[in-house]
Image: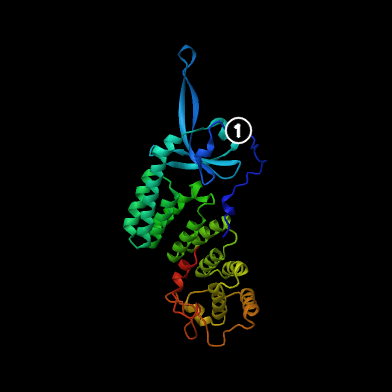
Amino acid sequence: MSDDFRKLDQGDEPEDLSISSPYGWEYLSDGGQIRCVFSTTKTIKMGTGADARKHESMIYWFVEQLSEERFEARIINIKCVPEGNAELIPLHTLIKDYKPELAFYEDSVLPAMEDLDEILDQGDEYREDGELYSAEMEYERACTIEKKNVRALFGLGLVYSSRKEVGRTRALLAELVGVKAAFDGKNQHLFNEFGISLRKSELFNEAIVYYRRGLDFVKNDEHLYYNLARAHYEDGDWNGCLDGLIMSHRLNPGLGVARDLFELMVGLAEDERLLRRYGKPPVPSKVLMRAKQILAVETGKLSLDDGPIYFSKARGRARGGRDVMGDNDVDIVEIDDVIDD
C-alpha cells in the first residue's frame, strides 16, 4: 500500500524555499518534518472615536508539515490538544504570520496529546478484547478532550455496530460526515475497519460508502476492493460485486478469497434453488460469463465438477461440495479481519 495518499497537491507553483526563518526551525522538527505549536496574533478594534481601543488576541495552532511547501494547522483548544478542521497554509505564510511556541508545545500540548492517545489506545484495546462498554467509555472520554476526535468517533461507530445498535450507528455516521478531518486521507484504514463492522451489522449500503471513501485515498489495495465486493454480494448486487472482484483480481491475481467468490458466483448462478434459499437475486448472464472467463484464464477450467457450490452465512463452506474458502473450515464472516490492512 502506497503512502501517496498523504500528499496534497494544491495545484499552484511551489513556494520559494529561499525564504529564511528567524526561529531556527530545525529544533521544531519531528523526524525531519516540522511538528510544533505556533501562535498568531489578531488585533481587534473595539469602540469608536475617542473610546476606540485595540485588543490583541493570541491563537495557538498545532502545525504539521505535509511537504516542503505545505503545512497543516489546527487550533489548540482549552484542553491543550488540536481540535477542529485543519487549515492548509503555505510556507511563506507560516514564516510571515506564525510564531513558534516550543515551550508551550513541550510543557502543555505534547503531554496532553500523549494522554489522549493513551485513552484512545485503551479504548481500542477494550474493543478488540470484546469489552465494548469499557471501550465506549474510553472513546467518550476522548471526545470530552477533543469533541470531534476522528479515531474516537470511528471507535464509537465500531462499538455501536458490533452491538447491532443500528440507530446509534447511523447517527454516528451522520456525525462523521460533517467532520472534515475524517476525510483527509489519513484515516483510510479506519474506513476499511468500519466498513467491515457495518457489513457484519447488515448495514450494506453504509459499508459500501465507507469502503469507497477508503478507496478515494488508496487506489491499489486489493483487500479493500475485495471487501467492497463482499458488501455488494451481501446486498445482492451482482454487478457491484463483480466490479470489486475484478479490481481486486487485477491488483493481486493470487488473492484466494477473491477467486473463491468468483467460484461462488458461478455456483449460485447454476442452482436456482440455492439462490432462493439464500435470498439472492439471479446472477445476470453477463456477470456469470465474465466470472467464468476469469476463472478459466486462471485455472484452465472452472473446477466446479465436484458438486454445486453455495454460500452459507454461518460457515464459509460449500455444502454438497467443498470448502470454497480454502482447505480449512473458515468462517467467511470473519475473513475480512484477516485481510483488512
Q: Is residue 221 above or below residue 13?
A: below
Residue 328, x across and y down, in percent: 46, 79
Identify the image quadrant of residue 123.
Answer: bottom left
Q: Which residue is mark 1?
A: 20
Helix, strand or loop for disc 1: loop
Using a 10 Å C-alpha cutoff, classify the residue at mark 1 as few (fewer than 14 neighbours), some (14 to 19) or many (20 or more). few
Residue 323: image location, x then y, percent:
48, 81
Residue at the extreme top? 50
Q: Residue at x 46, y 60 (%)?
A: 193
Question: Residue 68: percent from the left, percent from the top?
Answer: 60, 43
- Residue furthest toward the bottom? 306
Camera-side residue of 65 and 285: 65
Q: Pick the residue in front: 202 or 216.
A: 216
Give x and y (percent) for residue 227: 52, 66
Residue at image point 59% right, 41% down: 70
Model colouring: rainbow
321 vs 264: above or below: below
- Whether residue 182 is visible to the viewer of this picture, yes or no, is yes
Please identify the quadrant where the N terminus is shown: bottom right
User: Outermost residue, right direction?
Assistant: 13
Question: Of residues 147 and 88, which is closer to you in this image?
Answer: 88
Whether residue 80 appears in this view of the structure is: no
Residue type, mark 1 in image: Ser
**Residue 220 occupies which quadrant of the picture?**
bottom right
Q: Is residue 130 above or below residue 186?
A: below
Tally the marks.
1
The answer to whether residue 19 is left or right of residue 281 is right
